[in-house]
Image (cartoon, rainbow, N blue to C red):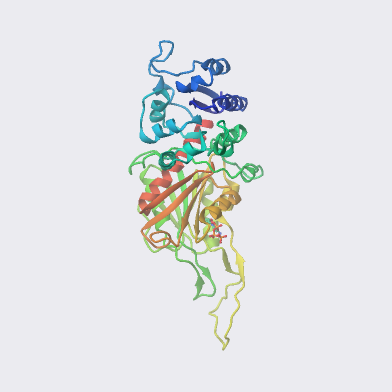
């Protein structure tokens, strides 16, 4: 069976011939590729080229009597892993962005639920034009992924941005987008070596309605809240975490059919009633509880603000001032729960982390994702009003292992929980399609 089913849409630009190379490379890597072309694309490359190489009818026109499928734009768009557009003209980008479905390819775009990856190629002025850039922004907001054009000499002999990205890079980005998550300890070589890809991920689906069942069968283990690291029986080191985001995810996941266990540290609110709760105070308690629960987990979410360091030797009795003006506290690193879960994960388990930062939010989040080999990171800039600790709202960017960045504007933590779960459901679907 083919590794991935990819539908390739070719539009009318001089770079159309490069779509043939991309198709061949994808086939060599075990993908099953079907092709559709716009009428203008056929001015640059004959459908026969693709037909000969795929052994399949190449659809240009739904109504063509040669077309073996009477509802091809529906069938062509279903049960695929990716809709890939190479090259994408300003025209097709404009149609996609505005919901215009006046030919086969634009109708297919509207009808598909698969991720969409677009590799534009056009004259620099057309690419830079306000309309094209507006349409690209709209599509990115809609969750469409782009392999951005690069700078170089263009067919019109001008030099500037608008050249189709190198075919090998396009293929690498397709495979990255569809790639397997790393599994079990020992063989964790993949993720850290993959390029830092600037493409975006699956088309954003509307948030699932609470009370759904799209997480039936999943067993979530979620760390929540802050930890307290004892200095002595009276004092401790801790942080501002309230547990609101973690509990919101727990509640939402349970409402969508998952079996949910939370390992809750210190929180300022009560846990939701629909989940199992294990209490932990210190990072080391939380670590022990997680390790115990891990074997049956299918999705791990590290939402806790775990102290990174704890006093090396907590005093047994209350520490007295004894006239001292200074006191040195020796701290030692706590176990990194998230990194360890990722290392120990069983096949198919998804691992999600959080990154609360004050600067270079995306950069740090990405490096956390690589270092801890995560499937997804929810990154937030805690300096933003309405984001971060102890608020009922949040602002975040979801980064997935494929390199996508999904921006979530100011919204309630409960609503954000559902958006995070939507992305987890999509990751699960991609993993299942490949299994
Ligand atoms: N985490 C964990 N165990 C730890 C520390 C962090 O499970 N001992 C998890 C958090 O739950 C969160 C993510 O790791 O999902 C945060 O990553 P981390 O690198 O620890 O971030 P910071 O604590 O902010 O560390 P740094 O100061 O290095 O950015």
Q: In which quarter of the image is residue 160?
A: top right
Q: Residue furthest bottom?
A: 323
Decide if residue 82 is in sight here. no
Q: Residue furthest front?
A: 157
Q: Quadrant of the N terminus?
A: top right
Q: What residue is rendered at 59% in x and 80% in y?
A: 327
Q: Is residue 131 above or below residue 85?
A: below
Q: Position of residue 331 (x, y in %)?
A: 60, 69
Q: Is residue 98 above or below residue 73?
A: below
The image quadrant in which ligand 1 is located:
bottom right
Using the image as rendered, state which of residue 419 and residue 186 is in the foreground: 419
In the image: residue 175, left or right of residue 253: right
In the image: residue 82, left or right of residue 371: left
Q: What residue is rendered at 60% in x and 75% in y?
A: 329
Decide if residue 400 is in sight here. yes
Q: Where is residue 17 in the image (x, y as percent from the top left)?
A: 57, 24
In the image: residue 198, left or right of residue 386: right
């Amino acid at each position: 069976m083919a590794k991935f089913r990819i539908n390739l849409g070719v539009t009318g630009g001089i770079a159309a011939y490069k779509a043939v190379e991309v198709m061949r490379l994808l086939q060599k890597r075990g993908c099953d590729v079907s092709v559709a072309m716009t009428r203008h694309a056929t001015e640059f490359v004959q459908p026969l080229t693709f037909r000969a190489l795929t052994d399949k009818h190449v659809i240009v026109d739904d109504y063509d009597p040669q077309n073996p499928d009477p509802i091809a734009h529906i069938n062509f768009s279903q049960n695929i892993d990716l809709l890939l557009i190479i090259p994408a003209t300003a025209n097709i980008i404009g149609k996609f962005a505005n919901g215009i479905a006046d030919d086969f390819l634009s109708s297919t775009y509207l009808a598909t639920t698969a991720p969409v990856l677009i590799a534009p190629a056009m004259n620099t002025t057309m690419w830079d034009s306000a309309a094209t850039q507006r349409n690209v922004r709209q599509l990115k907001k809609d969750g469409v992924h782009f392999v951005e054009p690069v700078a170089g000499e263009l067919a019109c002999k001008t030099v500037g941005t608008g050249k189709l990205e190198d075919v090998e890079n396009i293929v690498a980005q397709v495979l990255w987008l569809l790639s397997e998550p790393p599994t079990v300890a020992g063989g964790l070589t993949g993720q850290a070596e993959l390029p830092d890809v600037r493409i975006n991920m699956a088309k954003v689906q509307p948030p699932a309605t609470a009370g759904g069942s799209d997480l039936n069968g999943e067993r979530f283990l979620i760390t929540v809240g802050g930890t307290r690291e004892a200095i002595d029986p009276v004092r401790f080191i801790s942080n501002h975490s309230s547990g609101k985001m973690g509990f919101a995810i727990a509640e939402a996941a349970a409402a969508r059919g998952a079996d949910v266990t939370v390992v809750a540290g210190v929180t300022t609110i009560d846990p939701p009633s629909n989940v199992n709760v294990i209490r932990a105070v210190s990072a080391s308690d939380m670590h022990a509880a997680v390790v115990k629960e891990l074997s049956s987990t299918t999705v791990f979410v590290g939402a806790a603000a775990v102290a990174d360091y704890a006093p090396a030797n907590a005093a047994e009795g209350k520490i007295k001032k004894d006239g001292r003006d200074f006191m040195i506290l020796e701290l030692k690193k706590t176990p990194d729960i998230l990194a360890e879960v990722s290392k120990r994960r069983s096949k198919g388990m998804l691992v999600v982390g959080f990154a609360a930062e004050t600067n270079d939010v995306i950069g740090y989040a990405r490096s956390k994702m690589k270092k801890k080999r995560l499937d997804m990171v929810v990154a937030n800039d805690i300096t933003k009003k309405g984001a971060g600790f102890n608020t009922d709202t949040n602002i975040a960017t979801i980064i997935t292992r494929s390199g996508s960045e999904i921006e979530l504007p100011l919204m309630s933590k409960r609503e954000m929980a559902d958006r995070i779960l939507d992305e987890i459901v999509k990751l699960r679907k991609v993993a299942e399609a490949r299994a």
